[in-house]
Image (tube, rainbow, N blue to C red):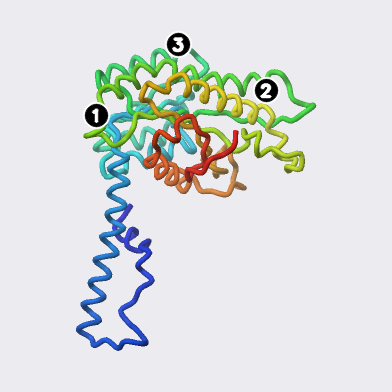
Amino acid sequence: MALRQLHSMSPCSKYTTQSHSVPLNISTGYKLKNFLEVFCFSHIFTEAIIFYIKMEIESVLITGANRGIGLEIVKQLVNLPKPPRLLFATYRDKSTVQALEEIRDSSKQTQILLIQMDITNSKDIESARKTVEDLVGAKGLDLLINNAGVLKTEGFPEIAGENMLYHFSTNTVGPVMVLKEMFPLLQRSVAHKTTETDVFRTTVLNLSSLGASMGKMRVENPDKWLQGLGYRTSKAALNMAMRMIACTMKDSGVLMVNLCPGWVKTDMGSNAADLEVSESVSAIFKTLSQLNDSHHGAFIDRNGKTIPF
């Protein structure tokens, strides 16, 4: 984030050096103006620095990083003041990696490795784990972002069994298997960290959907919500699976969170969506930097607000 942008965002920008009740001479007004500018700028700059310190990550693995939210995550990570040293970006289709290759080739501080991995293929996942392990070594993997997902709209009674299985295979089983394979590397990251020197927790972030919330589901919901039967049930199953895993690994030191990025303008979300992909990912990073033990196993939105399961 540019310093000029930080200054323009300052809550102090509403103050002026003029007062209708207490007249100021030019000298006094100039000094007050300088003071306010320095004070406000320092306040916002400090907040930004704290945010970026919390986001200092040594290594990160992102599934489905070749487009949409995954691609934007890669872009914003490499542009951090202190970006990750290692970034593993997975993709399924070789013909869709041009944007990733451009980021990789222009990256000066981050070593970006593109890994072809179908998250429904156990051999692909194992091969990816070996690639990651060879590079992270004893330091382990700091952040796993389960982003890859699929959506093919079909509702009841038209829904086919193949559609349901297609969604469950990719949106539910895939992320669980990726986590299972990468878990030893996440544990290494925990063992390598100390609370005195490391701010960022070893974390698993699973991208879910508000559409997976049974608590938000109502009979009066718009019909279009009902057309994603396979997608929504697979994401609800993902939430349950990861909730159970979070309970199982509660003493491991690895933080687990399910997060809805919002309705985002991507190939999956369509141009009718509410959010630009950059807005969504910026909010996700801010929330990611603020996670703590109270969020373990939680289902939250991009701003950190709890979503009912």
> Which residue does the image show at 44% across and 27% down from the upper left?
63
Disc 2 target residue: 163
Query: Foreground residue, 303 or 226?
Result: 303
**Would you say residue 127 is visible in this rendering?**
yes
The label number, if any, that marks residue 292 in the structure image: none
Mark 1 to mark 3 CA distance (whole Å): 34 Å
Q: Residues within 10 Å of mark 2 (few under 14, many from 20)?
A: some
Q: Position of residue 114 (x, y in %)?
A: 37, 26
Label 3 sits on what residue type?
Answer: Lys
Q: Are marks 1 and 3 in contact (CB under 8 Å)?
A: no
Q: Quadrant of residue 231?
A: top right
Which quarter of the image is occupied by the C terminus?
Answer: top right
Is 200 situated left or right of 66 in this image? left
Q: Is residue 82 above or below residue 119?
A: below
Nearer the camera: disc 1 or disc 3: 1
> Which residue does the image show at 27% across and 70% down from the upper left?
36
**Would you say residue 96 is visible in this rendering?**
no
Marked residue nearer the N-terminal end (2 or 1): 2
Nearer the camera: disc 2 or disc 1: 1
Disc 3 target residue: 123
Q: Residue furthest top?
A: 123
Disc 1 target residue: 194
Q: Is residue 177 above or below residue 292?
A: above
Label 2 sits on what residue type?
Answer: Asn
Q: Position of residue 273 (x, y in %)?
A: 59, 46
